[in-house]
Image (tube, rainbow, N blue to C red):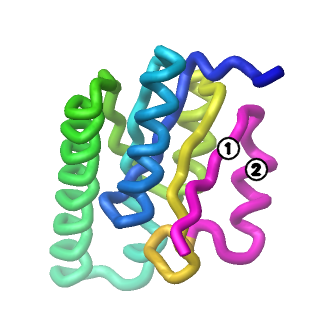
Amino acid sequence: MLAPFGRILLCYDASPEGMRALRCGAMLARQLDAETHLLSVLDLSYWSVGFGVMSSLGFDLDEAAAKKALDDGIERLRFWGVAATGHCAVGSAVDQIATYARSLRADLIVIGHHPHSVFSRWWNGSNHALLLDRVSCGVLFEVLS
């Protein structure tokens, strides 16, 4: 018997693997008539080194990209017939995903993964275990190889 997935948290960064996971999550959410949330995270770990105008400019560009990814994801979900609440977070991706999953009481997290992508920085080494140890819901990794 499958566990009920009434509330799904989709994590999206507009990458090809993120788009594939978004589509998979959308199909699942639509089929289950699940409450759907979309999360885009601006990971601050890259901006913790150095200060100044270039760092500030880079941060602003990344923040805009995270917001654009969120808007793009919401629009794609709408096109696929899924209404979703969007969330844009700043900080460690693992921390933010775990925090949102807990606060939203998500039953399932859907994440795209490709071994050589932007997402891979979240999942290399112990980060898989770090996220899995911090959530009490299911996690679906849509793998693009």
Left or right: 97, with 137 as reference point: left
From this view, report whether residue 70 is shown above or below residue 108: below
**Residue 27 percent coordinates (x, y):** 44, 33
Give the residue pinned by disc 2. 132
* Amino acid bearing label 2: Leu
Give the residue pinned by disc 1. 139
Q: Residue at x 16, y 80 (%)?
A: 53
**Residue 102 percent coordinates (x, y):** 63, 30
Q: Residue at x 41, y 42 (%)?
A: 39
Q: Are marks 1 and 2 in contact (CB under 8 Å)?
A: yes
Q: Residue at x 62, y 54 (%)?
A: 141
**Span highlighted in magenta in the image:** 122-145
Left or right: 30, with 7 as reference point: left
Q: Residue at x 74, y 76 (%)?
A: 125
Counting the numbered discs, the total is 2
Location of the N terminus by quadrant is top right
